[in-house]
């Protein structure tokens, strides 16, 4: 019952937490209920009370309880009575299994004795139940949306419930690599058209057998999301990350993990170095490196872009490349209109590099996508839709792909934009991809959706938010249902691995997402919906889409938003529920509970310290190393080589 019903007091508390966040947003970026000192999150008073309680009530019963909890699993969750035997079996397996078989000389530290969690026994129970439920919430949402939940925590969750863990086949489906001699753009293997009818209702696409089924309200048998359950889970997590005992426990556990790493490093540094040197044909340059966070419009470095601009001028000076209000301009005329000559350009005058002047200024950072400050050059060289059908952009990307292939061990996953302004964006992008054959075996692709509904609404491009969602998702559903009728888009979707949500996170909407929030069709104001609102409706449609595509034997998509770069902690909380993995995650350092949950669930975080250094956080303060030492699943990524890098 507790897992289904949402206590009204919890809902009220969650609203108070959100209200205080909105109140403090203009004053400072931190949120007081989530604020934790780096030194220690426990007040002296709380510590004093804990010590008194521990000394006065150290009875045999308490001792017995503590010893029982010492036997609990790494997730530190109380174990049901019926599963004690099964857990001891797991313990026996772990204790008898030979670890580090290939490197037996590694020293290991074992901590024995009573388990000291730093909180009272009563609080400890509350903390553990909260963490257990939080992990169950993530597992449920990942399985429903055909995304990943790691095996280890899943095994422990089943042990707690007294059930036998079984490997699941509900994970994502990826397109297999293109074989030698195979055409990556072939259409012969596309499935048959089903003739289903797709229609959006309350911001979520529903699939019907035909139009008559729409009138009968009989959608196909697919999982559909529940807004009420989602909001209940979100409010529970919002209350959990603000609870004092949970923050105390999570902080101490994270400190312990960090200390554990340092002790391991001190004891085994020489052994690790010896193992590294004995590993043949593998060093920094020839180990596999995958850039999982990179934008296609900035995937080249500034020197590469400059070289390409000069080369195109030498070859195509008299070619018509630009349409200015009906007047066609050659490349030479365009540069004359801008009072420029490519021969005089340098990387400095190109001015695409982000520096200190972009710090905390996302607007100035976006301007850096315009070479020499000219939007005409951005349209010509870095866009898929222009007078030459994005030919220059395709050529630059193929050159970047060729560089990756030459390097052999480097791979990238560039993001292309779908804005949701028009339903024609998908067919046009797919046509560009197929026409110019933008393929490299060292590249996969992602779709990024900028959160700029307010811009389109203010210019009357869209009547309401649901129209934007329709433009983003309906074409993909139609290509999934009828691939023969949408061949180019179906081929393009084979090379897509996921969706991203991008924009300036520091912009605050002040709207708390709840069951009373306006439905997307009712969102007609020029105000932008909140980050959580965007993420929920993207997640909800990806959930239905993935289940439909898996039924059809097609590849599925992961949801991988930009998250935690700036703004409120509710962003990271929503991503915990909806995202397979995230980019940035800097604000995790402000919440020990969320940081510990991201560790337990092993949620991948692609971090970009050089990017953060120019926008939101100085390089020396970046938490990448700290997260790595604690055991969070982090990786390095470039974000935008054009803005942040000097070399390949």
Image: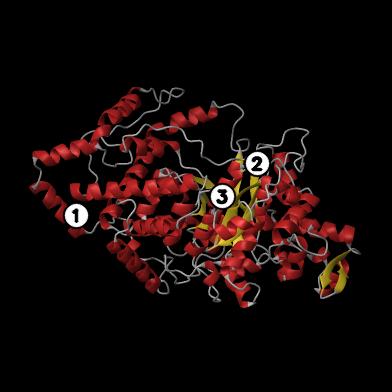
Relative to 146, 12 lies left or right: left
Mark 3 near mark 1, Cβ–Cβ under 8 Å? no
Determine the residue positioned at 31% across, 66% down. 12
The part of the image, by quadrant, that contains residue 569 is bottom left
| Mark 2 residue element | strand
Disc 1 crowd rating (10 Å Cα; few below 14, some 14-19, many 20+) is few
Q: Which mark is residue 544?
A: none
| Mark 3 residue element | loop
Q: Picture coordinates of residue 430 (x, y %)?
A: 73, 53
Q: Which residue is mark 2?
A: 410
Mark 3 or mark 1, earlier in chain: 1
Q: Picture coordinates of residue 72 (x, y %)?
A: 27, 37
Q: Which mark is residue 47?
A: 1
Disc 2 crowd rating (10 Å Cα; few below 14, some 14-19, many 20+) is some
Q: Which residue is mark 3?
A: 220
- For marks 3 and 2, give the one nearer the viewer: 3
């Amino acid at each position: 019952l507790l897992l289904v019903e949402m206590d009204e007091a919890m809902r009220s508390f969650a609203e108070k937490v959100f209200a205080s966040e909105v109140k403090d947003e203009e004053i400072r970026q931190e949120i007081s209920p989530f604020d934790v000192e780096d030194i220690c999150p426990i007040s002296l008073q709380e510590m004093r009370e804990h010590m008194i309680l521990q000394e006065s009530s150290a009875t045999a019963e308490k001792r017995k309880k503590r010893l029982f909890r010492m036997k609990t699993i790494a997730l530190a969750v109380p174990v049901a009575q019926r599963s004690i035997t099964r857990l001891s079996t797991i313990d026996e397996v772990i204790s008898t299994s030979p670890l580090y078989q290939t490197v037996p000389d590694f020293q290991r530290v074992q901590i024995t004795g009573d388990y000291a969690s730093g909180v009272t026994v009563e609080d400890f129970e509350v903390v553990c139940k909260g963490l257990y439920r939080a992990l169950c919430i993530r597992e449920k949402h990942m399985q429903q949306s055909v995304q990943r939940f790691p095996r280890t925590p899943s095994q422990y969750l089943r042990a707690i419930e007294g059930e036998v863990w079984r490997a699941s086949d509900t994970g994502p489906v990826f397109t297999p690599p293109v074989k030698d001699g195979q055409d990556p753009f072939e259409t012969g293997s596309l499935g048959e058209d089903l003739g289903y009818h797709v229609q959006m209702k309350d911001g979520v696409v529903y699939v019907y057998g035909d139009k008559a089924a729409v009138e009968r309200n009989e959608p196909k048998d697919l999982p559909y999301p529940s807004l009420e359950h989602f909001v209940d889970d979100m409010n529970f997590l919002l209350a959990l990350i603000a609870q004092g005992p949970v923050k105390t426990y999570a902080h101490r556990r994270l400190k312990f993990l960090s200390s554990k790493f340092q002790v391991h490093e001190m004891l085994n540094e020489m052994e690790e170095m010896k193992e590294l040197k004995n590993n043949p044909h593998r060093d920094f340059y020839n180990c596999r490196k995958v850039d999982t966070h990179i934008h296609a419009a900035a995937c080249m470095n500034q020197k590469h872009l400059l070289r390409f601009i000069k080369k195109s001028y030498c070859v195509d000076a008299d070619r018509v490349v630009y349409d200015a209000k009906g007047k066609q301009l050659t490349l030479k005329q365009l540069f004359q209109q801008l009072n420029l000559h490519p021969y005089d350009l340098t990387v400095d005058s190109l001015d695409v590099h982000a520096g200190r002047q972009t710090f905390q200024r996302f607007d100035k950072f976006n301007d850096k996508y315009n070479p020499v400050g000219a939007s005409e050059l951005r349209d010509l060289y870095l866009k898929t839709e222009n007078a030459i059908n994005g030919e220059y952009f395709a050529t630059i990307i193929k050159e970047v792909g060729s560089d990756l292939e030459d390097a052999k061990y480097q791979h990238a996953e560039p993001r292309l934009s779908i804005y949701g302004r028009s339903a024609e964006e998908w067919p046009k992008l797919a046509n560009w991809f197929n026409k110019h054959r933008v393929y490299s075996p060292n590249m996969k692709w992602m779709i990024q959706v900028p959160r700029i509904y307010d811009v389109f609404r203010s210019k009357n491009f869209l009547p309401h938010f649901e129209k934007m969602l329709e433009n983003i998702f309906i074409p993909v559903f139609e290509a999934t249902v009828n691939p023969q009728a949408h061949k180019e888009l179906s081929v393009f979707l084979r090379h897509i691995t996921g969706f991203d949500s991008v924009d300036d996170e520091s912009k605050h909407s002040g709207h708390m997402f709840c069951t009373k929030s306006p439905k997307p069709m009712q969102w007609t104001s020029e105000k932008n919906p909140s980050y959580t609102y965007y993420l929920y409706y993207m997640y909800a449609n990806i959930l239905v889409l993935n289940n439909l595509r898996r039924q059809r034997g097609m590849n599925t998509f992961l949801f991988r938003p930009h998250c935690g770069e700036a703004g409120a902690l509710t962003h990271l909380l929503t991503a915990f529920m909806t995202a397979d993995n995230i980019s940035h995650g800097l604000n995790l350092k402000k919440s020990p509970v969320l940081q510990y949950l991201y560790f337990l669930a092993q949620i991948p975080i692609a971090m970009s310290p050089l990017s953060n250094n120019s926008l939101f956080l100085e390089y020396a303060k970046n938490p990448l190393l700290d997260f790595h030492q604690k055991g969070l699943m982090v990786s390095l990524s470039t974000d935008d080589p054009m803005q942040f890098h000097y070399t390949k």
